[in-house]
Image (cartoon, rainbow, N blue to C red):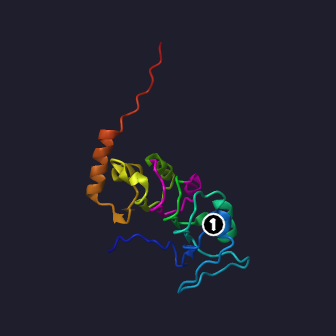
């Protein structure tokens, strides 16, 4: 039995807005998604019926207005489960991404994320199974993979590489060596 990660979330194809020179979320509504082999259905109100979004290979530097744009674009935006924001110029993990509780696949590779602690925000995503961050400055941080696997123990894939038992053992050893227990402050009596 295969333990492959389901990147599709459901049978509907992703809304494909890759390579559209989009530099702000407002631009998203001005573009028509690419038509794939399987067309994306629309609701009566014209919204797209998909739970997956491709915004890769654009020029986004922030996700200001992301939620509002998704509400206008998608029929069930709250259930978004697959987002590709790779190859933009995002300097951080926008907190808006953590509001999509069904998110299982998040591609952020090839951006400008330079602070490893930005990944901490993703711990709020209970269903996150696949994450890509390679090609960001944080990739060069010592303990990069172990840090992420300690923080996100539910990941099955990191940077398009399956998370192995050995990865988990290494991450646990790294955690014990690098994270000090918090001592409670003693009160004077």
Helix, strand or loop status at disc 1: helix
- Where on the picture, by quarter, is residue 174? top left
Residue 73, position as x, y percentages in the image? 67, 70
Q: Nearer the viewer, residue 127 or 132?
A: 132
When the figure is inspected, residue 156 is found, relative to residue 14, above or below; the finding is: above
Q: Is residue 84 magenta?
A: no
- Where on the picture, by quarter, is residue 99? bottom right
Q: Mark 1 points at which residue?
A: 77
Residue 178, position as x, y percentages in the image? 33, 40
Residue, far top: 189
Residue 101, position as x, y percentages in the image? 55, 59
Residue 131, position as x, y percentages in the image? 43, 61
Residue, far bottom: 37
Please give left or right for residue 176 compared with residue 154 in the image: left
Main secondary-structure element of the magenta-colored stretch: loop
Name the residue: 65% across, 66% down: 70
When the figure is inspected, residue 3 is found, relative to residue 95, above or below; the finding is: below
When the figure is inspected, residue 63 is found, relative to residue 4, above or below; the finding is: above
Query: What stretch of residues is rendered in magenta?
Result: 94-115
Q: Does the magenta stretch include residue 111?
A: yes
Name the residue: 64% across, 78% down: 32
Name the residue: 68% across, 75% down: 47
Please give left or right for residue 180 compared with residue 118 in the image: left
Packing grade of label 1 (10 A; few <14, some 14-19, many >=20) is many
Quadrant for the N terminus in the image: bottom left
Please give left or right for residue 36 compared with residue 142 in the image: right
């Amino acid at each position: 039995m295969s333990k492959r990660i389901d990147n599709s979330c459901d049978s509907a194809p992703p809304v494909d807005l890759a390579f559209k020179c989009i530099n702000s979320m407002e631009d998203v509504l001005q573009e028509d998604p690419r038509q794939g082999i399987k067309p994306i259905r629309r609701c009566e109100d014209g919204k797209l019926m998909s739970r997956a979004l491709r915004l890769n290979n654009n020029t986004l530097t922030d996700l200001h207005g992301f939620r509002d744009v998704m509400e206008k674009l998608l029929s069930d935006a709250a259930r978004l489960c697959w987002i590709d924001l790779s190859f933009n110029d995002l300097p951080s993990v926008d907190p808006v991404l953590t509001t999509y509780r069904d998110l299982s696949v998040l591609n952020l590779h090839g951006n400008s994320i330079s602070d490893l602690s930005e990944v901490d925000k993703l711990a709020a995503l209970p269903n996150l199974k696949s994450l890509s961050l390679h090609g960001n400055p944080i990739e060069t941080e010592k303990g990069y993979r172990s840090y992420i696997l300690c923080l996100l123990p539910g990941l099955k894939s990191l940077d398009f590489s399956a998370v192995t038992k050995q990865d988990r053992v290494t991450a646990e050893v790294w955690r014990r060596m690098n994270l000090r227990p918090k001592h409670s402050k003693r009160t004077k009596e």
